[in-house]
Amino acid sequence: MKSALLAAAASALLLAVPASAQGVKIGILNDQSGVYADYGGKWSVEAAKMAIEDFGGEVLGHKIELVTADHQNKPDLATSIARRWYDVENVDMITELTTSSVALAIHELSKEKKKIDIVVGAATSRLTGDACQPYGFHWAYDTRALAVGTGGALTKAGGDTWFFLTADYAFGYALEKDTSEIVTANGGKVLGSVRVPLNSSDFSSFLLQAQSSKAKIVGLANAGLDTTNSIKQASEFGIVSGGQKLAGLLMTLAEVNGLGLQAAQGLVLTEGYYWDLNDKARNLGERFFKRTGRMPSMIHAGTYSATLSYLKAVKAAGTKDPDAVAKKLKELPVDDDFAQGGKVLENGRMVHDMYLFEVKKPSESKKPWDYYKLLATVPGDKAFFTAKESGCPLTK
């Protein structure tokens, strides 16, 4: 009886400890089993662990905890997990958030709960545009930056007619819209588009429409396995050998590795990070490789940066109060192994340089993971919308 009373008293004391006195808890919420499992998945979890270890494992005198869950690309499931994390498990910040429909849902919940989210894996520029909110941030890249990099470069190089294969949800729509605007601004023309369900196995009817359009560029406004599968099937239809060019509008090192250089050679793509770009990138890449047996993409490296930046902001604020931490996130520069000279705008967009790459031919690759040649650096202020251009209500 006495031990039961002592246990009850101890649990009551635990419940009485204010959230501000507890350790910082970070959640990685992403797709760990589906179409985006290689794109982010468990590799992003490892990247966040690296950031926590590099920071020293504790902040404000308390241990940093990491929790993780698979949202299966379902906004309702993601919202249910995030609500439990916020309300019951005292999670302070959620990051990664692959899939734009999921990220938009969590963005709205975070606003309601006054909790910070830092989106890395999802692409839609709406996150820091019309859907912006005071506690929401967007790292690594977005549809606007991809459009400026890949869409702008290919149009200027003579690829002035486009047809889109577009993922049939928020991300695909935003990527098609942003790229179309860049194409037309550079004197190009969009001849048409077709919407493709997420996780499709058969792209034949969509590819036939792209082929019959006679567009010079077939823009793949999809990601993950959907991109690799559409590229493989495009090869079977002779799209490239017939004179059209494929543009992987959201491709990362993970998808290039999945395709192999034989299939991926010549593809032009935009990323915010490449492991062999400079000494800092190599430092992160080589340490990540020792842990995982693979090099990180911009999603994995971006998750590392987002986690580290959040912890730096907590330390600088001297509290994990979300208003104080959000303020510090917008004040502190982003200088780490992912981005150098990065800055966070008032709409939550982290601005940094982006890079236009071409995938090497197998004969050009000198070592494992030696996949890219740099075509151009796109300065951050050219790649991303300014806070005023974004349409974010916070900037008015």
Image (cartoon, rainbow, N blue to C red):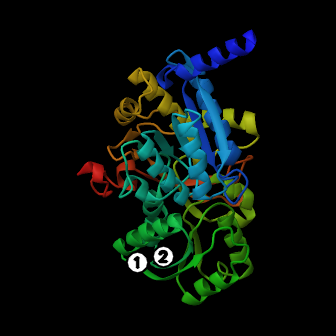
Residue density around tag 1, few if under 14, some if 14–19, many if 20 or more, within 10 Å = many
Mark 1–mark 2 CB contact (< 8 Å): yes
Q: Compared with residue 198, is residue 125 higher up or lower down, i.e. above or below? A: above
Tell me the element at label 1.
loop
Q: Is residue 244 visible in this depiction of the protein?
A: yes
Residue at 41 percent of width and 37 percent of height: 341
Residue 168's tag is none
Q: What residue would you read off at disc 2?
A: 159
Residue 188's tag is 1
165 or 68: which is nearer to us? 68
Q: Position of residue 271 (x, y in %)?
A: 54, 53
Is 104 situated left or right of 361 in this image?
A: left
Residue at 61 percent of width and 65 percent of height: 267
320 or 128: which is nearer to us? 320
Q: Position of residue 233 (x, y in %)?
A: 72, 75
- Cα gap from disc 1 to disc 2, whole angstroms: 8 Å
Q: Position of residue 363 (x, y in %)?
A: 73, 58
Q: To which quarter of the image does residue 167 belong?
A: bottom right
Residue at 58 percent of width and 47 percent of height: 299
The residue at the far top in this view is 2
> Which image quarter is the N terminus in?
top right
299 or 153: which is nearer to us? 299
Q: Compared with residue 66, is residue 40 higher up or lower down, i.e. above or below? A: below
Q: To which quarter of the image does residue 189 belong?
A: bottom left
The amino acid marked with disc number 2 is Gly
Tell me the element at label 2.
loop
